[in-house]
Image (cartoon, rainbow, N blue to C red):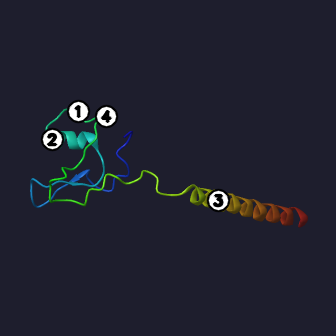
Amino acid sequence: PASSGLALGPALAETPQPQVWLATRLDLPAIAARLGLPANALAGHVLRLDPASPLGYTRDLDLLPNTLPPSRHLGYAVQWFAMALAVLAIAAVLHWRRRRGR
């Protein structure tokens, strides 16, 4: 990724067990440093949990990358355009009232 994202804390938080890592965001240089690798060693690679590991969340790699149907996208587009038109109409009415009052 181009950036590590919103930083609300360290990329790799400390845990009571030294063999367990808590990654709060994807910061490749920090992960590489923890693994003892050069800072750019993980660039272009994908990290995946071992399916045999009992730790972590259930791994479901068959998730669809986009779960919203096209009608939902269209609905959001209509909603935002309607909001923009409402703001424009309110601004026009306020501007018209202000000019009329002079």
Mark 2 in CB contact with mark 1 (< 8 angstroms): yes
Which residue is disc 4 drawn over?
44
Specify which label sits upstream in the sequence, 2 or 4.
Answer: 2
The quadrant the C terminus occupies is: bottom right
Q: Is residue 71 left or right of residue 34?
A: right
Mark 1 in CB contact with mark 4 (< 8 angstroms): no
Report helix, strand or loop for mark 1: loop
Which residue is disc 3 drawn over?
80
Mark 3 in CB contact with mark 2 (< 8 angstroms): no
Specify which label sits upstream in the sequence, 2 or 1.
Answer: 2
- Residue 86 point in image, percent of width and height: 73, 64
**Location of residue 27 (image quadrant):** top left
Residue nearer the viewer, 15 or 81:
81
Which residue is disc 1 drawn over?
41
Give amino acid for label 2: Leu
Q: Nearer the viewer, mark 2 or mark 4?
A: 4
Specify which label sits upstream in the sequence, 3 or 1.
Answer: 1
Report helix, strand or loop for mark 4: loop
